[in-house]
Amino acid sequence: MLRLRCSLSVAAVLFGGCGDAPVTEPSAGVLRLSGTGELTRPPVHFRHEQHTKALGPASCKECHLQGAKGEWSWTFLSARAAPDADEAMHRFHDGCIGCHERATPPSGPVVCAGCHPATPRLIGAQAEMRFDNSLHARHVKAHPDKCDTCHHVRDQASGALVAAPGQESGCLACHGPVARDGVRSLRQASHDSCVSCHLQAKSEPRPPFTCTGCHDAAAQAAFTRLPDPPRLMRGQPDHLWVSGGKASETAVPFAHAAHERIARACSDCHHLTMDRCSSCHTQAGAEKGGGIILAEAHHRRDATASCVGCHAQQTEVKACSGCHDPSAAAGPEKTSCVVCHRGATDAAALTSPPPAPSPVELAPLATLVYEAEIVIDSGGGEYQAAKLPHGKIITALDRPVRDSALARAFHQQTDTLCAGCHHHAPVGTRPAPCVSCHGVAGVTDDRPGLKVAYHRQCIGCHERMGLPVGCTDCHAAIGGAEVRP
Amino acid sequence: MSQTTVAPRRLLTPFNVIAGGILLVGGYILLVRFIEGLAATTNLTHNYPWGLWIGFDVMSGVALAAGGFVTSAAVYLFGMKEYKPIVRPALLTAFLGYFLVVLGLLVDLGRPWHLPYPFIRQAGPTSALFEVALCVALYLTVLFVECTPAAFEWLGLARWRKLVVQGTIALTVFGVILSTMHQSSLGALFVIMPTKVHPLWYSEQLPVHFFVSAVAAGLCMVMVEGALSHRAFSAQAEISHAELDRLTLGLAKAAAVVLATYTAVKLVDLSLAHKWHHLLSGWGAWYAVELGGFVLLPCLAFVIGYREKRLKLIRAAAAVVVVGIMLNRFNVSFIAFNYQLSERYVPHWMEIWMSVALVTFGVVVFRWIVQRMPILHEHPDYRGSH
Amino acid sequence: MSVSRRGFLTGAAFGGASLAAGRALGGGGVHHFAGHPGRYGLLHDTTLCVGCRSCEVACQKVNGMPQTPGAVGDKSAFAAERRVTPDLLTVVNRYDGDGGAPVFRKHQCMHCNEPCCASVCLVRAFTKTPEGPVLYDPDVCMGCRYCVAACPYNALSYEYDEPLTPRVMRCTMCYDRITAAGGPKLPGCAEACPNGAITFGRRDELIELARDRIKKNPGRYINHIFGEHELGGTSWMLLAGTPFSRLGLHDELSHTPLPEIGTSFLSVVPLVITIYPGLLAGFYSFSKRKERLAAEEARAALAAERARADKELKEKLEAAAKKAAADKEKAVEAAVKKATAAAAAAQPKATP
């Protein structure tokens, strides 16, 4: 019957089709519905937001089931219990088309291509919804001592969800990307909890409860943010030793409390559970840790939850990128190791928490001795020698370092930033002149000659920092005008 | 007969005035070319180093002169004696055609006096152009020798004539070999340019495409040229209108077969190289115009014309094929060339004029020879001889 | 180089047997010539190029050409994509990189490992030197411009305004400088580049160097060295952070050298030369035989007709003769009868 309708109503697609104007921009309110297995038609790009708006918030039950206790199942109608994919498809078809036909006046597509167009005009663009510390704090403040509304554990014996005060963890600890062993997927669990709760608010539904309310980047940006949310206490220490557990290792005294203030959520680092890193990332590499060994979990440059990865990300801003080239594969400088790996004085010291680190203070710039202006003349060429505003550059590079505790911690000294240009020169020593290495170019070691070394150093930095790179931005033309200001 | 019909010595005939005018301006262009260079006379650019003088004078000229080897092979090798009356005009047309190709080249080449260098100084045998040059040089000689009997008859050098006529078969075989090779290697010129010639025209089989289309072009050119010269030089022509019509019908049948073969070759190429989708583009429409309008349509016209004995239709179709072959050579050498660039080449008026002047020159020489030597008729002294 | 490796036309045409023998002995069919070892090359790192056009001016300078005034640092030239011309053997063009950031690519003759220009030249005006550069000899050049048409990189130009001594103009890779006595001097452009975007060196070392740069700066480069394998490889090679297709080059160029495709026709030449004479002679003798048979048939028919006519005539004559004889007999008989009757009538009168 359905097939009949499909074939009979081609004209209806051409002339009727969707009543509403096509959405041209990606929207968080569009869901991509597709069955499992081989599809005979393109997936449906379903305008959930539009349906919610058209039917009103009170009519969720048009499409979704509500249990006896008022709990919602956000899976479409009874498709969840469908024995197979075919049955699920039929339930979708009957549900959608039936409703479209029952509506007065009839609205919405009733033929195949109306919902399954070959090229979708709509694209879903859901932004990941992060329940960060600020949001958490606002919920705690509105519902004090009601942790069990969201947090629960599964009672092994009964299988029931029970509260476990003091053991609260992140959703991801149990709810993975797909449902497994009777545990709902993160997607199901969070929609069941969040949307149901927002709809069941005392007087009337309390936004957000629509797709775009949470999954739209602009909506997220408009959330009220607490400037300094309170710490989420779960018995974690303020300071702890991070080490492989052997006395011979140079352990890292980790300021947990200080990092909590920087992180948006605990899951920034505790990406699954609230346990110690080493509980999954063993030194030998265990399956539960994805085969990633403990050292890697801390040092991976391309990971967001690792120490080095997160620290490196902090340098990916224009102010730092002049010296910290984000495209380089090179890891942190060897001299940075000791910034973290300060080590305990002896094995016994590991048993007690490390002392709170004292913030690094940099000596004022005035303590450094340097030329304010350097004339760089590699001879010949189309332009006059460049006058390098050495002092101005140092001042400009020094400012962001001074403003950031992280930068101060890793720079350690005021003249560390000199290495941004004077690479290879040990901090604290007077750098050797560039010409001592860059007299002539070397092909095998890719070592530039003097003129190239100058240009690459300046231009590379300027490009990354978004500063001018034109010839006359540094040089005056021979017999020509002044350098552009 | 020729002795009795010498044209009156009047210089200011309309033909002479027009031809003289064209040639005079052509001479001026030649001067400009050799004083100010190609830049002043052509619209050639670094991206379009080959223009009308190559696409028309060389590419089309050689293809259209294919009538010479096709008819001489038909008569002398395949024994189709009834076509003998058109062999001499076809050979003369071919000789003049190749002669004009060389003349055109002398204008187009940067250093024309280096023309014999591949043979006397340094040979580049990997070049398709080397094969073209070698074959054209040899074939021009062969054509010259093949044309000499008419001159010997005119000059009364019977012994010389006999010597050449004895070698007819060898010369014809040599001519067919050379023609096959250089007609196809003109296509081979572009095989090295897969990134430049549009895929619809490019093929690694371009040599085959060029050869087959040249045979069709040669046949059609013989028809066109036969009709024109029969009309223009009716006093010289020996065969009757009825006889010419009968020969034209036979040529039309052959041309239809060759054009059908050519279409098949082109379509097989489209399939083998997965190029059908290109037909949907603008270039595809242009390709359809070329293949449909200038190959399939005349092919159909030949079939209808042959069955219904419609000579006018056949001659019109032959003219369309002659234009079509030029279009194809233009497409390969500069229209569908550099299809990825926005820059296009449009010939300078001097390029067009120079090409017209070359053709005019050819017609003048053809006329001069035909009015004197036994081309369109048999010499009374040698009637019926080989 | 391919050109010298490939069979000479006449050799290919008349020495098929020796060619086959050569293959069997030297394994020529599977031999691969990787190019002269230690030959030079240049690497253009587009991520380092700032589009200052110093290379353009330096190129003009070392080639003794008039220099474009004020070219260095002048960005107005990037409004439209330029190509090399006889006055400018190398050009820098601007393309749009990721996020619209400008990317500059220097263009010039790539000095292919297997150059099309050398393959298509019918006077061998181009030579691939063991040092890497492809050199051009204007003294033998005919000015046919096949090389200009065939160059897949559009890197050749021609002096159209020279009426009598036009030359094909292209980058020489500063052959004189890099082969100078006392060690190679940098090519003009490489020497002038302020930002070291052009590196001159041994081609294989440059490939190593390019790989090293990609490895050390994975975020900066596309993992591809343009010119390492393209169309058989080039002396000038490129690194980029943007797909090469957006820098006016082909992204997926075949690794097969174009001369290999372009000279495939050569294999047909010996076939035509060897097969055609026999084939055509065959056709000729067929048509001759047909003619002879027709003539014989005609002769036979004529003979038969003549025989038939002879026979008829003979029969006719015989019949006529018979008739004459019969007539004669009849007449004789009648005369005899008449005479007898007359005699009989006269006899009784005589004997009463």
Image (tube, rainbow, N blue to C red):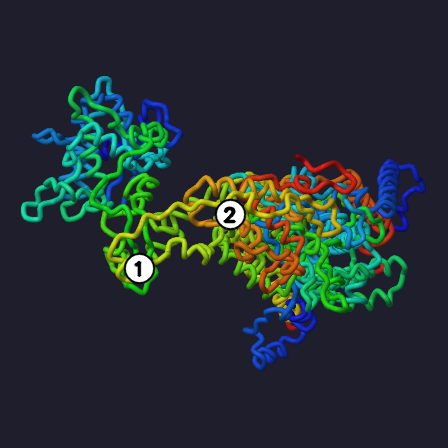
State whether residue A13 appears in this view.
Answer: yes
- In x, y percent, where is residue A484? 67, 35
- In x, y percent, where is residue C97? 54, 43
Query: Label 1 belongs to which residue?
Result: A293
- In x, y percent, where is residue C34? 59, 69
Q: Quadrant of residue A16?
A: top left
Name the kind of residue labelled 2 in the image. Thr
The residue sitting at 61% across, 79% down in the picture is C22
Image mark 1: chain: A
In the depicted view, which residue is nearer to us: A127 or B114? A127
Q: Which mark is residue C158?
A: none
In the depicted view, which residue is nearer to us: B275 or C166? C166
Of the numbered discs 2 and 1, the one sitting upstream in the chain is: 1
Image mark 2: chain: A
In the depicted view, which residue is nearer to us: A239 or B276? A239
Name the kind of residue labelled 1 in the image. Ile
Element under disc 2: helix
- Lateral position of residue C188 relative to residue A68, left or right: right
Element under disc 1: loop
Query: Label 2 belongs to which residue?
Result: A414
Is residue C284 shown above or below A150? below
Label 1 Cα crowd, 10 Å radius (few <14 / some 14-19 / many 20+): some
